[in-house]
Image: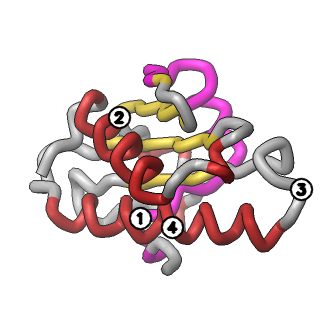
Amino acid sequence: MVLPRDQRLRGRFVFDRLYQRGQRLHGTWMTVRCLEAEPSLLRPDHRDTTPGSHRVAVVVSSKVSKRAVQRNRLRRLLHGHVSGLLRQLPPDRGQWLLISLKPGSETADPAALLGECSSLLARAGLQP
């Protein structure tokens, strides 16, 4: 499953801001960076029409797995999980999230990956 367009995080300036100023939460298999939304960094045609919308990006580098099939499988797994969580959240304030998988996460059990993702998102303040 792919994230809906209004939940995707895109753009070089957005990623630069997340890497510079985002709060980092580390887990065994992933790192989550979160930052309060700054819609001025988005292109005008990608800006939110609804206040309080959350956006997410999932990064799975070739250090995690050399096989694109495996990287895409992990990305789709996390997209489906995060999309379901974002739909349950009340629209309070927008937040941007960058989920980066660490090397070794391709051998982890999918349930353990999703559990760690949920716990890191709860620590970031995103609870349904």
Q: What distance separates the C-alpha of mark 4 from that of mark 3?
A: 18 Å
Is residue 97 toward the left or the right of residue 36 in the image? Answer: right
Is 126 situated above or below 68? above
Q: Which of marks 1 and 4 precedes in the sequence?
A: 1
Q: Which residue is mark 2?
A: 120
Q: Which residues are magenta?
A: 4-25
Q: Residue 107 appears at what percent x and percent y? A: 66, 51
Q: Which of marks 2 and 3 precedes in the sequence?
A: 3
The residue carrying pointer 3 sits among few (fewer than 14), some (14 to 19) or many (20 or more) residues within 10 Å by Cα, namely: few
Asked if the magenta segment contains residue 18, the reply would be yes
Judging from the image, what secondary structure is the residue with disc 2 in? Answer: helix
Q: Nearer the viewer, mark 3 or mark 1?
A: 3
Q: Residue 112 appears at what percent x and percent y? A: 42, 48
Do labels 4 and 3 touch, CB within 8 Å?
A: no
Q: Which residue is mark 4?
A: 77
| Residue occupying the point 32% across, 39% down | 121
Q: Which residue is mark 1?
A: 7
Is residue 61 toward the left or the right of residue 123 in the image? Answer: right
The disc labelled 3 sits on which kind of residue? Lys
Residue in front for this viewpoint, 113 or 62: 113
Q: Which residue is mark 3?
A: 66
The disc labelled 2 sits on which kind of residue? Leu
Q: What distance separates the C-alpha of mark 2 from that of mark 1?
A: 18 Å
The disc labelled 1 sits on which kind of residue? Gln
Q: Nearer the viewer, mark 4 or mark 1?
A: 4
Asked if the magenta segment contains residue 31, the reply would be no
| Residue occupying the point 51% across, 54% down | 109
